[in-house]
Structure formats: structure tokens, C-alpha cells
Amino acid sequence: MKMRILAGITALVVVGAGVFGVINRQTYTDITNEKNFMEKLQVAELPGQFAVTVCEEMQERLPQLPIILRVRFTDDVEYLFGTSRQKICVQEVYAGDDIRVGDTIYITTGKNVSTMGEATAELGFVNTPKPDCDYLVFLSGERDSLDKSLPVYDVYAESLFRPVFCYEDIENKIVPVGEENTYVPYKDVKENEFFCTSEEGMKAWQDLKKNMLDRYPI
């Protein structure tokens, strides 16, 4: 029941966070080919009260997922229409029958860059993973893909944030937001691991990360 409520909250957060200019959308402009294009985008911070609630849920839910991996991101994000993906090399398999250490696969890492009104990047409140760093990722399964060169797996998406945790310690900056939405300039939080509006929410997120990394250590 809580997950259904959170799914509803997710929709409200996305709308409340600023789905800018949907009604007046005329064209889709691909800005991902521009140099340093992320510096021009806005990203949403997760409201702190929701972060606390969802982190409590994820303490129990994440270890039950079918695919749990330690991976190394080997390339930057590839932005596709409607989604994005990133190539990884599997370093350790904690759960998952059809994946082996050393496999190279794609995983989805977020939604598309949008130019509706102000340009935004829908990243699931988690920064894009850095190449050549190890991350703990929780996946829901393989998706059908027209590109058969490598299999594509979905990051678990039935929560307010993407469960992708860096094995390195990363300092997170909180940028104040207004009442209308929780979007902030990406350039102001580009060094973060997580995007959240409050210290309480960020602590809950960091506690969840620590518990998961302790459970699945290098």
C-alpha cells in the first residue's frame, strides 16, 4: 500500500517540481550535442519529507530485488529520445542468475533531457554516475531493446529516486528552493551524489547508502 501511495506522490512531485511548458510544447530540441550542455540544465531536488519515507521503505525493499550488482561505469551517459543509458562492467554479482563478473551491459540511468520551457534533466534525484568509479546498483530486469549489441537493464524505478550508490564518499550540497517547484541549476549541485531539499532527508539517504554498502561491501 505504501508503495502505491509513493507512486502517487512521485507523480505529484514531478508535476509540482516543475514540468515546465507542457501545454505549449512545440518541438523537441536536442541540446545533448552541445559542449557542457548539463551546465545549462535544471534538476529537481527530492523534498526531504519524501526522502525520509522512501528511504525507510527501501531499507527492506532493495535487498529483495532480483539483480544487485557492483559495477564500474566505463562510459559517459548516452542520451536517447525518452531515456538514457550508460555502459558498465560488472565487478561483482550479489543477486542475478544471468549476469557474470566481467560482463559489459547497458543500464538505464534516467529519463531524457527536456526542453519544455526551461531545459531540465530528469535524473531520478541522483547524479549521473562517474566513469571509472564503482557503484552498487539495484536493477529490476532486462528490457527489450532495438539495439542488440549489448543487453539493457532497467534500474529499479518504483521509488522516488534511482537506487545507485557510489562506493566513494561524496559530499552533498543542499540548494534552497522556492514554493513552486524544487528545480535548481545543475551547475550548483553537479558535484553531489544525491539531490535533496533538506538535511533530514539527506541524512536518511546517506544512512540508506551506508547500510547498503555495508551489506554489499567491496
Image: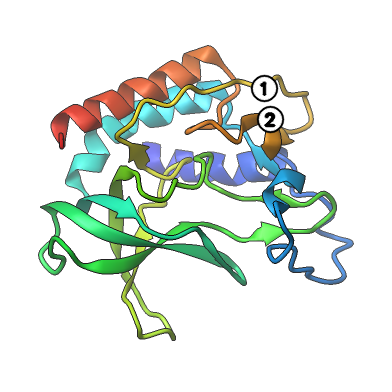
Q: Which label sits on residue 175?
A: 1
Q: Amino acid at mark 2?
A: Asp
Among the 4 quarters of the image, the one containing residue 97: bottom left
Q: Is 217 placed above or below 177 here?
A: below
Q: Inspect this view and state whether residue 66 appears.
A: no
Q: Where on the picture, by quarter, is residue 107?
A: bottom left
Q: Vertical placement of 22 versus 51: above or below?
A: below
Q: What residue sits right under mark 2 in the picture?
A: 188
Residue 75 in picture, x, y percent from top left: 43, 60
| Label 1 or label 2, whichever comes before in sequence order | 1
Image quadrant where one finds the C terminus: top left
Q: Residue, x 73% and y 36% (percent of image)?
A: 185
Dot 1 and dot 2 residues touching (CB under 8 Å): yes
Quarter of the image where one finds residue 141: bottom left
- Which mark identifies residue 81? none
Q: Position of residue 109 (x, y in %)?
A: 46, 55
Q: SS of the residue at dot 1?
A: loop
Residue type beneath disc 1 = Val
